[in-house]
């Protein structure tokens, strides 16, 4: 290890960050968004291993890249994202990602650090074979990623995968074990898996939002430019278009709202393998004029739709700590949410929204109507805005450095 020649003006990296998405590219989910935030907080304290969305990054070796003017080591394992984001890849991305990391691990280890961070459970079996000086792991969510996979044929492996993941973590004894989940969900997970996790502890560690991108305004300009001036209520749901997000509940509720309001509108931001199913359901429910699927959008465009909306919806069956909902908080949105991880710390009934503990569309639609009555000033809910301050990315550097020594300021 340590065979990479480092220019004298580039500091030695403190740790390797292994990301399943390209932090230099577009955030396609919470893990990539968190990787971007990590680089903004710590810069070249991290050396990054990830796929690359562009073709001009050398493959299979360490090169110096640029992160907003800061030189940073990066290792391109190759791009494996499907071009058509509305379809699931034939081979699950987790399998491809694991195979590429295993292939390139000897080269990856040539960088000048023996500390490593990852948030991909499929890599644990590969990484545990190496003696690291320090290891930090973050659950991207405390839901079983295989039991709730988009690949229905693989879900029977969920219990095996869960046991194997926790067994690997127990063997590796991470110096910091984090979870993108609220405290209540984290504590329950620890109790349920006490035997497998042994003496390990988990710290609740949600993904943050960027306050320079997500901030509140009354949204009048955006509503006019987006053609939403005559719509009410304007509802927004962001995330992957997958069954796990429970989009059917939101659509059924919208069909009910159509009978109560002359021009409601539900906007989906994101894409995924269920897009065609959603389009069919929209046709069957007769809500074509009330629904808009906008696909993946850059953060600035997501913000425009957030500030233009009246209520942000979470209809998921399962959820980690939702990046999109944290961004909605930062824009001062009111919420209607199913009872998933994160909402207990972000949504308070009667203050900034309502948590619906049943998947009944009538109840969900009633909660949306009730949320519309909650106080706002220029379409901004003050309670949501106050809660969001706890999750600003400005706190990430301090919070993480306190938990994992390689990131601390006094590290040599």
Image (cartoon, rainbow, N blue to C red):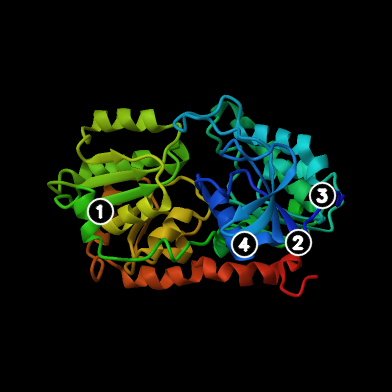
Residues at circles 2 and 1 in contact by the CB criterion of under 8 Å = no
Mark 4: give few (<14), some (14-19) or many (20+) Cα within 10 Å. some
Residue 366's disc number: 1
Residue 4's disc number: 3
**Label 2, label 4: how far apart the Cα atoms are:** 30 Å
Residue behind mark 2: 14
Residues at circles 3 and 2 in contact by the CB criterion of under 8 Å = no
Nearer to us: label 2 or label 1 = 2
Residue behind mark 4: 187
Nearer to us: label 4 or label 3 = 3
Secondary structure found at label 4: helix
Residue 124's disc number: none
Q: Residue furthest front?
A: 8
The residue depicted at 38 percent of the width and 39 percent of the height is: 295
The residue depicted at 65 percent of the width and 67 percent of the height is: 400
Q: Is residue 160 visible?
A: yes
Mark 3: give few (<14), some (14-19) or many (20+) Cα within 10 Å. some
**Label 3, label 1: how far apart the Cα atoms are:** 60 Å
Report the number of numbered marks: 4
Earlier in the chain: of badge 3 and badge 2, it is 3
Residues at circles 3 and 1 in contact by the CB criterion of under 8 Å = no
Earlier in the chain: of badge 2 and badge 4, it is 2
Mark 2: give few (<14), some (14-19) or many (20+) Cα within 10 Å. many
Residues at circles 4 and 3 in contact by the CB criterion of under 8 Å = no
In the displayed structure, does residue 125 sit left or right of residue 91?
A: right
Q: Is residue 342 above or below residue 388?
A: above
**Label 4, label 3: how far apart the Cα atoms are:** 42 Å
Q: Is residue 339 visible?
A: no
Residues at circles 4 and 1 in contact by the CB criterion of under 8 Å = no
């Amino acid at each position: 290890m340590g065979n990479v020649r480092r220019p004298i003006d580039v500091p030695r990296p403190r740790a390797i960050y292994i990301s399943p998405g390209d932090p230099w590219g577009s955030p396609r989910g919470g893990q990539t968004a968190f990787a971007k935030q990590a680089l903004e907080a710590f810069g070249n304290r991290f050396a990054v291993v990830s796929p690359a969305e562009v073709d001009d990054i050398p493959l299979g070796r360490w090169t110096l890249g640029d992160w907003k003017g800061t030189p940073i080591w990066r290792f391109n394992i190759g791009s494996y994202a499907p071009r058509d984001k509305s379809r699931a890849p034939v081979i699950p991305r987790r399998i491809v990602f694991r195979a590429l990391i295993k292939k390139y691990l000897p080269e990856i280890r040539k960088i000048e650090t023996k500390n490593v961070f990852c948030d991909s459970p499929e890599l644990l079996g590969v990484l545990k074979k190496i003696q690291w000086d320090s290891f930090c792991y973050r659950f991207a969510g405390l839901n079983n990623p295989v039991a709730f996979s988009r690949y229905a044929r693989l879900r029977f492996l969920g219990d095996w995968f869960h046991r194997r993941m926790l067994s690997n973590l127990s063997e590796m004894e991470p110096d910091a074990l984090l979870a993108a989940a609220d405290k209540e969900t984290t504590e329950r997970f620890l109790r349920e898996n006490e035997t497998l996790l042994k003496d390990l502890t988990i710290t609740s560690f949600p993904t943050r939002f960027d306050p320079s991108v997500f901030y509140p305004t009354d949204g009048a300009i955006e509503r006019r430019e987006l053609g939403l001036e005559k719509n009410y209520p304007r509802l927004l749901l962001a995330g992957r278009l997958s069954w796990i997000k429970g989009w059917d509940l939101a659509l059924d509720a919208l069909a009910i709202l159509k009978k109560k309001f002359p021009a409601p509108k539900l906007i989906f931001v994101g894409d995924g393998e269920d897009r065609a199913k959603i389009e069919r359901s929209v046709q069957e429910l007769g809500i074509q004029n009330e629904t808009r699927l906008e696909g993946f959008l850059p953060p600035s465009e997501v913000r425009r739709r957030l500030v233009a909306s009246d209520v942000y919806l979470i209809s998921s069956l399962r959820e980690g700590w939702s990046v999109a909902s944290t961004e909605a908080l930062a824009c001062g949105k009111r919420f209607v949410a199913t009872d998933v991880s994160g909402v207990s710390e972000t949504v308070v009934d009667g203050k900034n929204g309502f948590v619906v503990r049943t998947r009944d569309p009538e109840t969900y639609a009633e909660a949306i109507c009730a949320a519309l009555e909650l106080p706002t000033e220029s379409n901004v809910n003050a309670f949501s805005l106050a809660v969001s301050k706890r999750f600003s990315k400005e706190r990430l550097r301090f919070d993480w450095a306190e938990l994992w020594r390689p990131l601390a300021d006094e590290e040599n």
